[in-house]
Amino acid sequence: MLQDVGSVFDNSFAVKSPRPADPVLCYQKGMVATTGRDPLSFPKAQDFTGKTLTYLFKMAGEDYYLADAEPDPQWELADRRLLRVAQPQARAFAAVTGMHLHYWYTHNRHCGCCGAAMQPSQTERALFCPACGNTVYPTIAPAVIIGVVHRGRILVSHYSGRPYGGMALLAGFCEIGETPEDTVRREVMEEVGLKVTRTRYAGAQPWGFEHDLLLGYYCEVEDGEIRVDHSELKDAYWLRREEIGELSDSASLTFHLISRFRDGFDPFPPERGYIFRHARAEELPRLMQIYERARAFMAEHGNPRQWGQSHWPPESLIARDIERGKCYVCIADGNIQGTFYYDFCRDAEPGYRNIEEGAWAFDRPYGVVHRAASAGLRPGVGAAILSWALSQAGYLRIDTHPDNTVMQGLLNKLGFARRGVIHVEEDNDPRFAYDISQKEAARP
């Protein structure tokens, strides 16, 4: 990516005076003045006699300065298209980073509080107002770049009403009060109408062209129809790895995410040999057999009442779960190894609103697992289900019957904490309530 210049970049603040041969960055209308294109080179401090030059940073052994002046007409102006591919890359990155600082300096000449002229600090990279004491630091806008993946495909798009017409990923600025993961979920729903089930951080990039700090994420989504927000996007569609082809631009985080996926990177590999997916309608008879086996297992292990008395769960409920996309299966060795209900939202289980004899650890959106059952074909299915659900949600809540000592033992082993007592729709028996966040989880 553009910023991959190693340790040759030092942006430590300093107050310096330029030497005649030091490179100077001089901008006009979002373009930088150059004295050469191959290799990329810039005017020197000796070309700006009598002009104000501000020290910016050190790059590849050179001290870079910013000129508060108009470029000489004899110099060529380079736009972002050139800077994304220009060599040496360290100079191109210097020009882009300098562009970020140039924008900040020129848009903060006067105090936003009282209107007085701002002055540069002599101790830190900041501007301060001598009249009212207001201090302003460089503006950095966090934004997410999102590689949406599903069933071996990645979602690509084209912007609506922007000069750039090439292939892009979904993106958006972080709003006040959001984590980057929140932004991923919101932007994907707003721009293409798909629900995110899990996210994975994939890297970052300072993007001085737009004064941004770009945060890259892969995310996985539920099955659903793409509903394009045409105010933001011209179109959006799925591509398989073999359909992506060659990518000409290696400078951006967008193309880093696309190329990694194209070259075989799987951001969400199966959990220890398991594949997790939505259950299908034709699998309903097999799921009911698994639940029948689970009821027998419970009875044999001292828990005949939890599902046995009501013959829980009824087939109509599982059919509804499948239709709503809430019923999942885990597959291994070509067979369904287990099934469960999973959902994620702020109120994923209304029965958890009232918790007695305690409280939940966090008041935030959570994942919930219900009706988890193993086919009994291999060990560790319950742990794999809970581990997968936690990887989706980051924070998981669950309940179990007081007689279900097997589940209680598993929850304790995985690091779940018992929080109190809740009640569910199956019967009037109390349920022990547990929760866990990803930081507390123990791997099965």
Image (tube, rainbow, N blue to C red):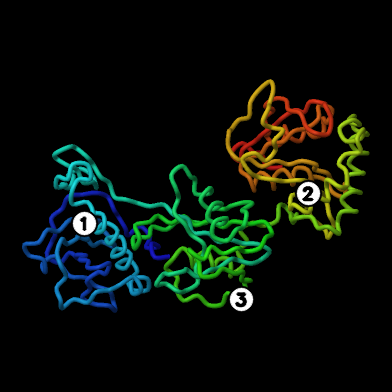
Label 1 neighbour load within 10 Å: few <14, some 14-19, many 20+: few
Q: Which quadrant would residue 121 be assigned to in this image?
A: top left
The quadrant of the image that shows the C terminus is top right
Residue type pointed to by label 2: Asp
Neighbourhood count class around disc 2 (C-alpha, 10 Å): few under 14, some 14–19, many 20 upward: some
Task: List the residue tagged with mark 3.
Answer: 243
Q: Position of residue 381 (x, y in %)?
A: 79, 46
User: Which x, y percent locates residue 156?
Assistant: 55, 68
Label disc, if present, on residue 321 of the rendered structure: 2
The secondary structure type at the circle numbered 1 is helix
Q: Which residue is drawn at 61% across and 53% down?
A: 196
Q: Please identify, in this view, whether the residue under mark 2 or under mark 1 is nearer the observer.
A: 2
Residue 66 or residue 192, whichever sits in front: 192
Label 3 residue SS: helix
Q: For this view, does 6 lie left or right of residue 109?
A: right
Q: Mark 1 points at which residue?
A: 106
- Quadrant where the N terminus lies? bottom left
Task: Specify the quadrant of the image occupied by residue 244.
Answer: bottom right
What residue appears at the point 32 percent right and 60 percent down from the top-left corner?
8
Number of dots carrying numbers: 3
Residue 432 vertical position relative to residue 346 in the rendered view, above or below:
above
In the rendered view, tell whether residue 257 sits above or below residue 290.
Answer: below
Inspect the image, locate mark 1, and give the three-letter code of the amino acid beneath it: Thr
Q: Earlier in the sequence, mark 2 or mark 1?
A: 1
Under mark 3, the amino acid is: Glu
Label 3 or label 1, whichever comes before in sequence order: 1
Along the polypeptide, which appears first: circle 3 or circle 2?
Answer: 3
In this rendering, the answer to whether 155 lies above or below 138 is below
The residue located at (62%, 57%) in the rendering is 194
User: Do tag 3 and tag 2 residues touch (Cβ < 8 Å)?
Assistant: no
From the viewer's perspective, is the residue at label 3 or at label 2 nearer?
2
